[in-house]
Image (cartoon, rainbow, N blue to C red):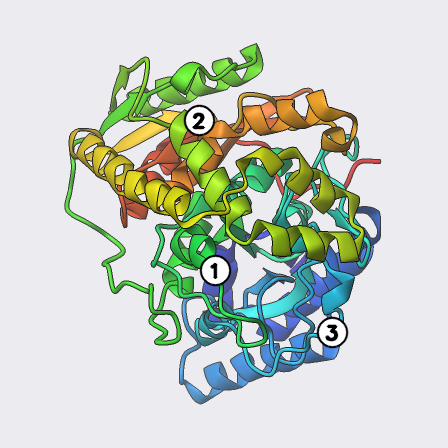
């Protein structure tokens, strides 16, 4: 079979389970694709072909014995370099961690392997996973396969670039402020930020996470189809006692009327015409699929939530973050921390006040989702930014962060969010964001499938020069 790497994960897993294609063949196809396109985009920064093929052989042996191999039987996937994979360095894009070799797998890696997936490579991230662009001193810069002049997103830019270019059928990413959703948007694929507690997280190689990452950072999948996100979520969200935040919530909740709230410019967000058109088009697609869409001027507070999330994220141990970034000397991390220095919090009363307000905002959003199944709004107020825009000057840095408000807000309440890629403006991707109540990823995916049916950018693609 030619071009196995082009298949969806669902189709490929079906062929492997029927033994019409072997896991080794699928893995070799992914490795060949990596060799062909990764030099142009630098999405995968560490891979060991012999290890990947050994994983594939184990899947084939299991199928030969009649033992089965899980929902992702033999499907090549990538994982982000900020999670533990036994025997590999958990660098998080930092030279200071180049020798931080994991002695065990993170829960995500274990769950992907249990589902039958074959991990073919580790994807790039900005230093410390701090940025909307993906570059670092250790692994270099990742380029967007659709257009190297625009960002591939961050911090899961390597994950999005890989899956868009056909290196693996599903990519793992992490999201504390948009790091799954924005790279998916920038590279023209789909990306799901699950609810806090849906996917277990733990890196034995690293110190315990501070409070903000514990209560708002999650792992989630990126893929070329919504159906593949659904399968990946089921695989990634299996139980693991190492994460005290993991919740045994069902993957499908009670039925709700197909009622969507539409916010084109939430909380006064500046929205460029191309993004506005994409959100309106997505609303029409939902209506065509039988959804009721009600346009609102505003949902519960988003701008305030984004501000509080930034304060929690970059203020939770800000001085230690700044000192580490200075030792690393990474310009992107320093720009991110410096540009948000006025949001750093350094006293217990301020921290307590934010966490108290977080409870009120979460309640307001939960009540909102009693009325609406989903909220449809922009991923970003702008199209994907020119590469390295945040380093140009202070005004450009502020422009980048202002446009990302709809993404940054959602993690404060621990809500799920889905980026659906809907089209291209020239060769620049555009898409929309769907948000639902806690543990209602099923509603995000249901609405996402309706929007996806109206058309998405073709992928995988050959990287453009």
Say above or below: 139 vs 442. Answer: below
Q: Kindly report which numbered mark, 2 or 1, lies closer to the viewer in this rendering.
A: 1
* Mark 3 or mark 2, whichever is nearer to me: 3
Q: Residue 419: x, y in percent?
A: 47, 37
Labels 3 and 1 touching (C-beta < 8 A): no
Q: Is residue 458 visible?
A: no
Q: Is mark 1 on a helix, strand or loop?
A: loop
If you read the primary sequence from the N terminus, does the residue marked by circle 2 or circle 1 appear first? 1
Observer-nearest residue: 13 or 428? Answer: 428
Which residue is rendered at x = 43% and y = 44% of the image? 226
Look at the image and tell me whether residue 119 can be seen. yes
Indicate left or right for 252 with 450 as reference: left
- Classify residue 87 as left or right of residue 276: right
* C-alpha gap between disc 3 and disc 1: 35 Å
Identify which residue, 282 or 82, lies in the foreground: 82
Q: What element carries label 2?
A: loop
Question: What x and y, as percent, mark residue 334?
Answer: 72, 44
Identify which residue is drawn at 33% across, 26% down. Answer: 301
The residue lying toward the viewer, choosing from 128 and 422, is 128
Q: In this view, does 124 lie to the left or right of 302?
A: right
Please provide percent x and percent y for residue 134. Answer: 71, 45
According to the picture, the residue beneath numbered tag 2 turns out to be: 454
**Numbered label attached to residue 210:** 1
Q: Earlier in the sequence, mark 3 or mark 2?
A: 3
The spot of residue 354 in percent (x, y) is 36, 41
Within-10-Å neighbours for mark 3: few <14, some 14–19, many 20+: some
Q: Mark 3 points at which residue?
A: 49
Label 3 close to label 2 by CB (< 8 Å): no
């Amino acid at each position: 079979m030619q071009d196995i790497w082009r298949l969806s994960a669902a189709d490929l897993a079906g062929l492997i389970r029927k033994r019409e294609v072997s896991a080794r063949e699928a893995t070799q196809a992914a490795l060949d694709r990596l060799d062909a396109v990764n030099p142009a985009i630098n999405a995968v920064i560490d891979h060991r072909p012999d290890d990947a093929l050994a994983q594939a052989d184990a899947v084939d042996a299991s199928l030969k014995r009649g033992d089965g191999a899980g929902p992702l039987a033999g499907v090549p996937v990538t994982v982000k370099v900020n999670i533990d994979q036994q025997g590999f360095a958990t660098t998080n894009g930092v030279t200071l961690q180049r020798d931080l070799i994991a002695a065990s797998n993170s829960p995500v890696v274990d769950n992907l392997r249990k589902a039958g997936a074959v991990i073919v490579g580790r994807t790039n991230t900005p230093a410390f996973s701090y940025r909307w662009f993906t570059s670092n001193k250790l692994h270099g810069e990742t380029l967007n396969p659709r257009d190297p002049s625009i960002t591939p997103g961050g911090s899961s830019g390597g994950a999005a670039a890989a899956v868009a270019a056909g290196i693996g059928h599903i990519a793992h990413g992490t999201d504390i402020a948009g790091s799954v959703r924005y790279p998916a948007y920038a590279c023209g694929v789909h990306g799901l930020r699950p609810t806090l507690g849906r996917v277990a997280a733990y890196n034995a190689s690293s110190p315990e996470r501070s409070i903000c990452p514990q209560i708002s950072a999650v792992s989630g999948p990126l893929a070329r189809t919504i159906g593949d996100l659904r399968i990946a979520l089921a695989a990634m969200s299996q139980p693991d006692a190492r994460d005290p935040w993991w919740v045994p919530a069902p993957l499908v909740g009670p039925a709700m009327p197909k009622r969507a709230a539409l916010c084109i410019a939430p909380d006064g967000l500046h929205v460029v015409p191309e993004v506005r058109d994409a959100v309106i088009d997505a609303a029409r697609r939902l209506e065509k699929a039988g959804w009721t869409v009600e346009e609102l001027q505003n949902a519960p507070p988003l701008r305030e939530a984004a501000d509080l999330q930034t304060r929690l994220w970059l203020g939770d141990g800000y001085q230690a973050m700044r000192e580490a970034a200075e030792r690393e000397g990474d310009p992107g991390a320093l720009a991110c921390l410096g540009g948000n220095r006025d949001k750093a919090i350094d006293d217990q009363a301020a921290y307590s006040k934010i966490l108290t307000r977080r409870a009120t905002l979460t309640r307001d959003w939960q009540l909102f989702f009693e009325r609406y199944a989903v909220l449809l709004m922009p991923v970003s107020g702008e199209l994907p930014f020119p590469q390295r825009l945040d380093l140009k000057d202070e005004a450009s840095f502020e422009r980048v962060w202002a446009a990302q408000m709809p993404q940054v807000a959602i993690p404060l309440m621990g809500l799920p969010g889905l980026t659906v890629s809907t089209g291209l403006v020239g060769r620049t991707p555009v898409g929309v964001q769907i948000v639902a109540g806690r543990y209602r990823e099923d509603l995000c995916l249901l609405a996402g499938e309706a929007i996806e049916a109206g058309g998405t950018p073709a992928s995988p693609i050959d990287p453009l020069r």
